Amino acid sequence: MKQTTGNRKPAATAVPIRHLDLKFDSEQIDSNFYRHSEFGSAYFHALSIFLTFGEDLVIDTARYHRDLLTDPELKRRVTSLIGQEAIHSKLHNALNDSLAHNRYPVNLYRFLADQVFEYGFKRLPNSMQLSLMAGIEHFTAVLSEYMMKHEEIFYMSDDEKQRALWMWHMLEESEHKDIAYDVYQELSGSYPNRMAGFGLAFFTILFLVPLGGAMIPVLRKPRNIFKRSFWKDAARSAGLLFGRGDSVYGGTMDHILDYLRRDFHPNDHDTTEYLEYYKEKLLHPETGLLTPYLVREFVPQAKAS
């Protein structure tokens, strides 16, 4: 897809709120969902646990700052952001509950995440929480674009529910990737503060979550640490996530660091064609992957200031 530069603000598009019902079955959860790798999959399972707390922070921050906006269209888009993130949190919690039945340390990680957010991120000044929200949304946009470009990843497993969850999440994160940033620019725009929020998001997503993910296979099956295959998978998974070339974060570092540009805007990375493709693939009334799970879809109405 094409990339442009400059702090542009394209015409806003409708961002629907979609209610899904996936009904996860703990007996059908694939522990090696991501490219047949246990450690690689564990990263995304750790991300699933921690992102529910991140999404709740985004929701609270967005609600607070929505009341400070005067543009009714931006307010409407913030309402869409809140709605999408609320359902993300709900469905990922449903997945996490199923993981807990498969000896995943979900309750431990929920406790740890609660401490980090309750006594860390939630005590930051509102301006820093807004910056952190924009930073987190940048990382989810980068991850979503990577996944959009690697559709084959989702079909390396027969776990249809996890496939539906991550592809739906990928679609919606890309749909609303500019909203938090536009709110930040509207209400603050401070470059140093934006960099501070980016640093916190960087540390969380590229250090804390990988650390949590790396511990999951060890905590689930401690005896496996004595097996050579265990460590081979760990090395392979590290390459899939952070190695040179086309890895999740190693291959997207230029995109991640593009946030450092003073005139950066999320829509400089154009995913319009991918969105059109995946909306058809996921939401077609007859053949859409998500259609069997879709309960309701609507777009919030704009309200006067």
Image: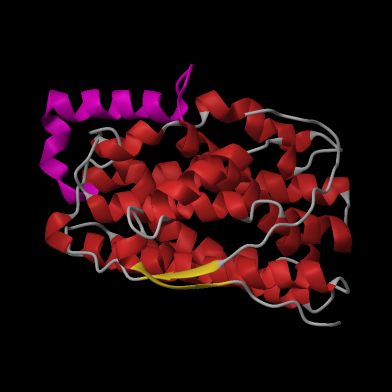
**Does residue 193 lie above or below 130 as drawn?**
above
Q: Give 69 or 17, whichever is nearer the viewer.
A: 17
In the rendered image of this protein, does residue 170 appear above or below residue 255? below
Q: Quadrant of residue 3?
A: top right
Q: Is residue 14 visible?
A: yes
Q: Quadrant of the N terminus?
A: top right
Nearest to the observer: residue 118 or residue 165: 165
**Identity of the residue drawn at 19% across and 50% down:** 220
Occupied quadrant, residue 182:
bottom right
Q: Main secondary structure of the magenta part?
A: helix
Q: Which residues are magenta?
A: 219-248
Q: Is residue 221 magenta?
A: yes
Along the line of sight, the residue nearer the viewer: 187 or 110:
187
Residue depicted at x 85% and y 35%: 6
Q: Quadrant of the C terminus?
A: bottom right
Q: Is residue 16 magenta?
A: no
- Residue 79, relative to residue 251: is it above or below? below
Picture residue at 70% right of the left edge, 54% below the top: 134
Closer to us: 28 or 38: 28
In the image, 229: left or right of 281? left
The image position of residue 118, as x and y in percent, is 56, 71
Residue 147, image x, y percentages = 46, 38
